[in-house]
Amino acid sequence: MKTLFISIILIVYTMKAETKLFPELQTYCKTIEGEFSRISEERKENLKKIAAYISEKYKKGETVNLTFICTHNSRRSQFGQVWAKIAAGYYGFDLRKIQTYSGGTEATACNPRTVAALKRVGVRIEEVHQLSAPVTVANNPRYEVRFAEGEPPFFLFSKKYDDEQNPKKNYAAILVCSQADEACPIVFGAEMRIYNGYEDPKRSDGTAEEGKIYDETCRLIARELFYVFYLCQNT
């Protein structure tokens, strides 16, 4: 009887939750699964490790904490934080149990080009200022992020990966740039540390190509994180 009770609890816990993405974002997300074949086998092996970490903790009923780390916490790590949360919602995970964060080896500001790229695909982002959670760097806007009906917002701003608002233990550190990978051979408190790097879209800043490059980077990171949660859903 005890075993049956535990089994029922696990089934209820892992049932697909209803997350209603905003319509424009939902339309965008529906096209991503068709691009999984564009991910190289080498990259897929890396992504499978992240999926295995998430699946193991989630099936145990533990909160999954994912911290995306790059140098300045302004572009790639911010994309990672946003897309991991959206992908979890898209595939029906309990979003209370999937918490995403980002940080850098130093704090600067969330780049407005990053924000613009996310807005173009249907993520709703507004600049806000909250005295209860001040930023510690001048000219470092705080953005409220919404992606689904009825879901509470979360916030983007640049900070170091060990900022007080990020987890100090029981998390996966996903390093998304080579400089951060080299600067952080050990990420204290992390249960898993993995390098999954992307080329910095900063290279296009101030050029006629910047919108295109940021959109491509945004979609690339979305594609790989959707693949991760697709694997989690099917394991």
Image (spheres, rainbow, N blue to C red):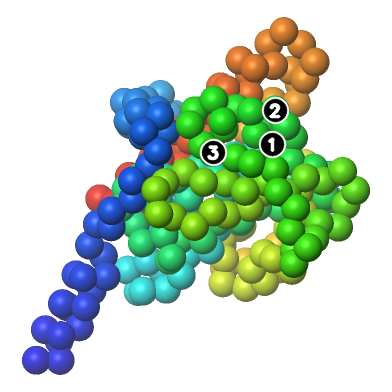
Residue at point 51%, 36% (across, down): 123
Task: Give whichever of discs 2 and 3 has the lower sequence position.
Answer: 2
Q: Is residue 113 visible from the viewing direction of this image? A: yes
The answer to whether residue 124 is left or right of residue 53 is: right
Residue at point 82%, 46% (across, down): 140
Disc 1, disc 2: CB below 8 Å? Answer: yes
Q: Is residue 178 visible from the viewing direction of this image? A: no
Residue 186 occupies quadrant: bottom right
Q: Please name which of the two marks, 3 or 1, marks the residue nearer to the observer.
A: 3
Disc 2 designates what residue?
A: 113
Residue 216 occupies quadrant: top right
Look at label 2 and name its amino acid: Arg
Task: Give whichever of discs 3 and 1 has the lower sequence position.
Answer: 1
Residue at point 21%, 70% (across, down): 12
Residue at point 43%, 66% (across, down): 97
Q: Tell me if residue 121 comes above or below residue 163 in the rendering.
A: above
Q: What percent of the width, then of the height, locates residue 195?
A: 61, 46
Disc 3 designates what residue?
A: 124
SS at circle 1? loop
Q: Tell me if residue 164 comes above or below residue 137 in the rendering.
A: below
Q: What percent of the width, then of the height, locates residue 104?
A: 76, 50
